[in-house]
Image: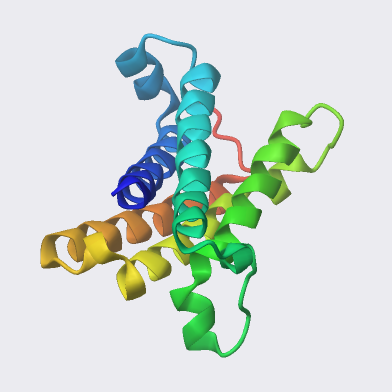
Amino acid sequence: MIARFAATFGYLAIFLSILSSEYMAKMRKISGMPFLRAHHNLARIGVLLILIHPLSLALQAQDFTIFLPVLYPVETFLALGGRTALYLFLLAAGIALYRKKYRNWKKVHYLNYLAFLLVSAHALMIGSDFKQDIMRIIAIIMAVTVTGIFIHKRIGVGKKIYK
């Protein structure tokens, strides 16, 4: 039960963190906090929960190979995409912590979008809470939304609107 809770709510927190980056002003208004603090709080909660998910499964099974990514075949890679996504989330979060030292930190931080899509595939393929149609639809809508935000951010990079 802990693993399922952590997975589902970690997934949601990461989604909200990504969504908040698209709606910074609204996020500030809703949360009552500066955008970056609200964004980082959501990201911290999400990363903590997605760490609890495999840890609780590994402790229950007494098998820590759950932390080893499987890269081949493609179907298995996608089904176990949460493993790879965990490391991508940690890398993206780590580089963001040291963003003042790395000029191109944002390019690495974009790995969050890929990681989210891997988690979506993982949830849809083997997630026990995602067997229900409504949860599958929500996961697909979230994945499409994250893809749209990524495309919008990449198209908008370097373009300034002058009024």
**Residue plotted at (72% across, 30% down):** 97
Q: Residue at x 53, y 46 (%)?
A: 51
The reply, left or right, for residue 5 in relation to residue 161 is left
In x, y percent, where is residue 133?
Answer: 12, 67
x, y percentage for residue 73?
Answer: 56, 90
Nearer to the camera, 102 or 90:
90
Q: How is the image coloured?
A: rainbow
Q: Residue at x 51, y 34 (%)?
A: 43
The answer to whether residue 146 is seen in the rendering is: yes
Outermost residue to the top = 32
Numbered circles on residues, count: 0
Residue 25, percent across and down? 41, 21
Q: Is residue 28 left or right of residue 129?
A: right
Q: Which residue is drawn at the image coordinates 40% and 39% (left, top)?
A: 19
Residue 152 appears anywhere in the view: no
Q: Is residue 114 above or below residue 70?
A: above
Please determine whether, in this image, residue 135 is positioned above or below residue 160: below
Q: Nearer the viewer, residue 153 or 52?
A: 52
Q: Nearer the viewer, residue 10 or 97?
A: 10
Q: Is residue 77 above or below residue 81?
A: below
Q: Quadrant of residue 12?
A: top left
Q: Residue 160: x percent and y percent?
A: 60, 36
Residue furthest out toward the bottom: 73
